[in-house]
Amino acid sequence: MNVIVADDEFFARKALVKMLEEMALPITVCGEGENGKEVMELLRTRPVDLVITDIRMPEMDGLALAKFIREQGYPTDVIIETGYADFDYAKTAIHYGVKEYIIKPLNGQELCDSVRKVLEERSRTGMEVFAFSDIVRNAGVCRQIFGREGSWGDRSFCMVLANGRDPVRDEPFLGEWLRKHGEFKELRSFYFAGRNEGVWLAFSDERREVSGLFGRRAVLELKTHLPAQVQVSFSLWHGGIGELETAYSECVYAINERILRRERVFFYRQEKQMEEILTVEQERRLYQAAESGALEAAESVVWEVFLEAQSKERNIYSFLRR
């Protein structure tokens, strides 16, 4: 479990880190912050399971940080450190999903008990904490969920991925649409809250072109009924559990076409036309901006490249650099 600690008092923060590192628990301190704003930046750069934060900090206090984590939908739990005088104030954080409160000065055993409670709760909801990419890259977990290689027999499958800014979990239409139009023998569905990601495995005895399974009216029906901020992608046909990771990668590549095209439904294209879309001059400007920390100049180059790619109808694979 990845943990970030936040406290504006340097020695208090270092003492907390030391206590956590000495615990016989499967945790890693992956970052520190002096205030909530620093933690916000860390959350954007790495997966974080738990934030342990002081309630009183400059610029952004612990309650504001807990509120931000809840409203942004991060799959991150929060433990708040508080003094006796602030305890009633801290309890208002229950609205922001705070898991535990620890009274200062910190007691090692109380801290350990609180962290262990979070660990146990997250293990009970493990499928929601996981991402599908985590599962397919872990052979042991993959076997537990999907069975052993060859257990699916001779059936082929294609993968369907749905994600976006609107909730996917409460959207049953896609599963119904697949059953109605796909002529599949079996559907298996999974939901992963951490990335608001729905995954369907659609099984069939024959490998017709996936895009050819659905007529224009069917695709239009899907676009019409999906939430406005949800997109869907389809992989090619595959066989066996060992090809799950490849199918997932295809879905991710396909759905990333939304960066360039304002579509809702995407099918993976096997022939990837790899074009050099970054000119030597643009690459030089981008390198110089990054090296000197000139954020606006770097952003200018990136936007320039994206706009050119859109106007010339290049595909998303052009952004891959070997």
Image (cartoon, helix red, strand yellow):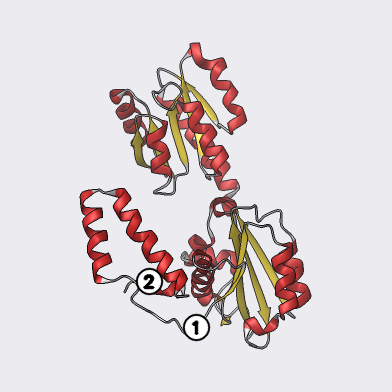
224 or 42: nearer the eye? 224
x, y percent for residue 217: 75, 76
The numbered mark at residue 320 is 2
Q: Is the residue 177 above or below the residue 209 in the image? A: above
The numbered mark at residue 39 is none
Query: Dot 2, how many residues are within 10 Å of its Cα: few (below 14), some (14-19), or many (20+)?
Result: few
x, y percent for residue 17: 33, 33
56 or 116: nearer the eye? 56
Quarter-wise, where is residue 276 in the image? bottom left
* Secondary structure under the numbered disc 1 in the rendered image: loop
The answer to whether residue 27 is seen in the rendering is no
For mark 1, what is the residue?
270
Q: Quadrant of the C terminus?
A: bottom left
Q: Is the residue 26 above or below the residue 209 in the image? A: above
321 relative position to 47: left or right: left
61 or 227: nearer the eye? 227
Q: Quadrant of the N terminus?
A: top left
> Amino acid under label 1?
Gln
Q: Is the residue 294 above or below the residue 213 in the image? A: above
Q: Is the residue 258 above or below the residue 13 in the image? A: below
The answer to whether residue 154 is seen in the rendering is yes
Labels 2 and 1: the sequence-earlier one: 1
**For the residues bearing labels 2 and 1, Cβ distance under 8 angstroms:** no
Farthest-out residue, right: 180
x, y percent for residue 108: 40, 26
Residue at the spot 54% in from the left edge and 71% down from the top edge: 251
